[in-house]
Image (cartoon, rainbow, N blue to C red):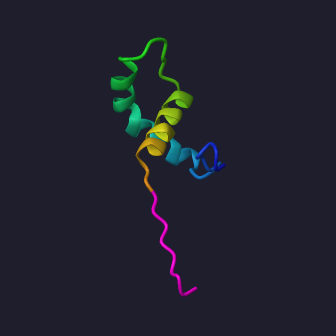
Amino acid sequence: MLNGGVVPNIYTNDELNVVREGVKRLFKKWAATQEGVTETPEALLEFFYNNIKDNLHLSICMSPIG
């Protein structure tokens, strides 16, 4: 999970359909610059997860007091 960056079963099937529809326009724009990329549900989700990994930044702050 830590290496892949994907939490299994974090979204229900209905939510995944909404995600796929949401990234479809950006995926088509990106796919136009790539060779051999076809629009499949798996490709849309991979595109979504890769965008999250590329753009997500996390800061962890801990108290020295304990």
The image position of residue 19, as x and y in percent, is: 45, 42
Can I make out residue 4 in this image? yes
Magenta stretch holds residue 63: yes
**7 lies left or right of 35:** right
Q: Residue at x 45, y 45 (%)?
A: 52
Query: Is residue 63 left or right of 3 when viewed as pictured?
Result: left
**Which residue sits furthest bottom?**
65
Q: Can residue 18 be seen in this view?
A: no
Residue lying at 49% horizontally and 67% vertically, measured from the top left: 60
Q: Residue furthest front?
A: 64
Residue 59 is situated, as x and y percent measured from the top left of the image, at 45, 63
| Location of residue 29 in the rendering, given as x and y in whole percent from the top left corner | 33, 24
Please tell me how many numbered marks the rendered image carries. Answer: 0
Question: Which of these two is toward me, 50 or 3?
Answer: 3
Residue situated in front as seen by the camera: 19 or 27: 27
Q: Residue, x 49% and y 18% (percent of image)?
A: 38
Q: In this view, does 20 lie to the left or right of 13?
A: left
The range drawn in magenta is 58-66
Q: Is residue 40 above or below residue 3?
A: above
- In magenta stretch: residue 60: yes
The secondary structure that dominates the magenta segment is loop
Q: Quadrant of residue 30?
A: top left
Position of 8 compared to 44: left or right? Answer: right
Which quadrant holds the C terminus?
A: bottom right
Residue located at (44% from left, 42% from top): 54
